[in-house]
Image: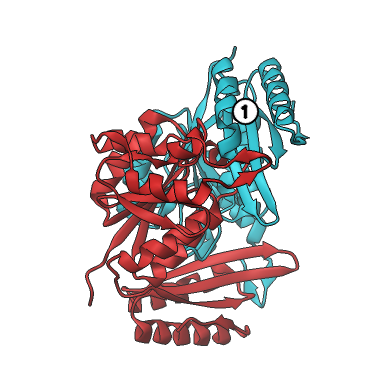
Chain colours: A red, B cyan
Amino acid sequence: MSPQPTAAIIVIGNEILSGRTQDTNVAYIGKKLAAAGIDLLEVRVIPDDEERIIKTVNDVRPNYTYVFTTGGIGATHDDITAGCIAKAFGRKFVENQEALKIITEHYKGKFYQDQELLNSNRSRMAMMPEGVTLIENPVSKAPAFQIENVYVLAGMPSVMQGMLECVLPTLEKGDPFYYNTVTSNLLEGTIAERLTEVQNAYPKLSIGSYPFYKAPNIGTNLVIRGQDKTMIHEATEAIIEMVKSFGATPQIERQV
Amino acid sequence: MSPQPTAAIIVIGNEILSGRTQDTNVAYIGKKLAAAGIDLLEVRVIPDDEERIIKTVNDVRPNYTYVFTTGGIGATHDDITAGCIAKAFGRKFVENQEALKIITEHYKGKFYQDQELLNSNRSRMAMMPEGVTLIENPVSKAPAFQIENVYVLAGMPSVMQGMLECVLPTLEKGDPFYYNTVTSNLLEGTIAERLTEVQNAYPKLSIGSYPFYKAPNIGTNLVIRGQDKTMIHEATEAIIEMVKSFGATPQIERQV
């Protein structure tokens, strides 16, 4: 079995905490990491606040193989993530010449609404901690960066997704996580005992029970998750049998 | 000005970290707290793991006026939140007689698929730390609970929302947070400098810039957020003028 890499995400953004914007990056990154066998164990959402960003990055980064941050790396005054990361690592905050070259080549001589796209605010996006590795941005070009085990990504979903695609091949992988879902109209209270027996028989799997009450649909999703395909398959069969034994008809969604 | 209450949310759930389920509770609670003038300053998402739940609750609760947890209070083996909260507070984990009465009255003698709804797994939902205050569940009846400044809510959105409605009137309020949004087809790099001037003129407001690139729509949402309606109004007007000065047409969404 491969060693188990782990990860955390730090979402930097007032707009998520205020409820104005629905975050979708966590679910997206979570799925990609699961498929890469990297166990996402913690997410923190914090405001665009220097002291909090520095403290959170330094609290979190010793505990995981990888840390991903999202948000705060654009061209405006509220984009303070890069400078905070420099402070968190005690590094100088400098103009990254490679990043500046990419930004300059992309924006120079291009105009939008009569403004040349290359200006001092765009160049500001080349300011990074000293000694970072750039992360390619296939969507809007201005690169992100990696510093030790911390990957500093954009907050805009399309841009973040493009950057993550470039990062994933460079990460150490584990055994992928898979899950099957067995849905029925049985209630949690009905199946709880028998479900515990299945969980106890497969302690290496994580079996989750998620009830839903959206009239007229009432029932429970049972999710069987883990890294061992044979075990997932066996536990899924056991749960299907259990559901049938209560006279219900299971619907099954399988990854395995 | 009212004192400023603060809050954190702890989302307990493997299904959020795996990316299988898109969390929507944070955005929902965030909006409700903002309207109540309670400043949501941190969210943590953690797995259904005893040690992590206990540590996270104890790390977070001294730092905020209110802490809300979501998830892990149902009837199955993976619902371990209540027991962990008891351990975090060093209290006994006991059958709450008031909760048991509510659950019994609701489920006794009712049948679904030939099973009486009241069974030992349902009764298990009355297990809580000693000395809690119950939180009403207008949706599916089994109550949640409050212990000191920690409010232990369900994970299912409809149930969580019903519980939150019952909790909100009991919380200390601050001055509500409001925001206006000014959208235009201007790019961040274009407006960055002038936007910084507006932010500097209104240091008590939080002015955020959120670009979007969804071809053919390219542009930026500028969000002006704070508790002082007059200031928000003035800063919004300044930003509208700025957008117009670049020859663009602002679209405005106002709360103030």
Choose between A169 and A196: the one closer to the eye: A169
Choose between A170 and B206: the one closer to the eye: A170
- In-image side of B54 versus B102 (left or right): left
Choose between A88 and A34: the one closer to the eye: A88
> What residue type is disc 1 on?
Arg
**Which residue position is annotated with label 1?**
B225
Place of residue B43 in the rendered image (x, y in percent of width and height, measured from the top left): 46, 42
Q: Quadrant of the C terminus of chain B?
A: top right
Place of residue B165 in the rendered image (x, y in percent of width and height, measured from the top left): 66, 39
Place of residue B249 in the rendered image (x, y in percent of width and height, measured from the top left): 77, 36
Count of numbered circles in the view = 1
Place of residue A252 in the rendered image (x, y in percent of width and height, measured from the top left): 56, 82
Residue A250 visible somewhere in the drawing: yes
- In-image side of B40 versus A249 (left or right): left
Q: Chain of mark 1?
A: B
Residue B18 visible somewhere in the drawing: no
Label 1: how many Cα within 10 Å (few below 14, some 14–19, many 20+) = many
- In-image side of B250 versus A88 (left or right): right
Residue at the location (58% across, 47% down)? A110
Residue ranking furthest to the front: A109
Residue at the location (51% across, 82% down)? A254
Residue at the location (26% across, 34% down)? A92
Name which quarter of the figure residue B155 lies in. bottom right
Choose between A106 and A168: the one closer to the eye: A106
Q: Quadrant of the N terminus of chain B?
A: top right
Is residue B236 positioned above or below B163 on the image? above
Residue at the location (69% across, 41% down)? A113
Is residue B218 positioned above or below B244 on the image? below
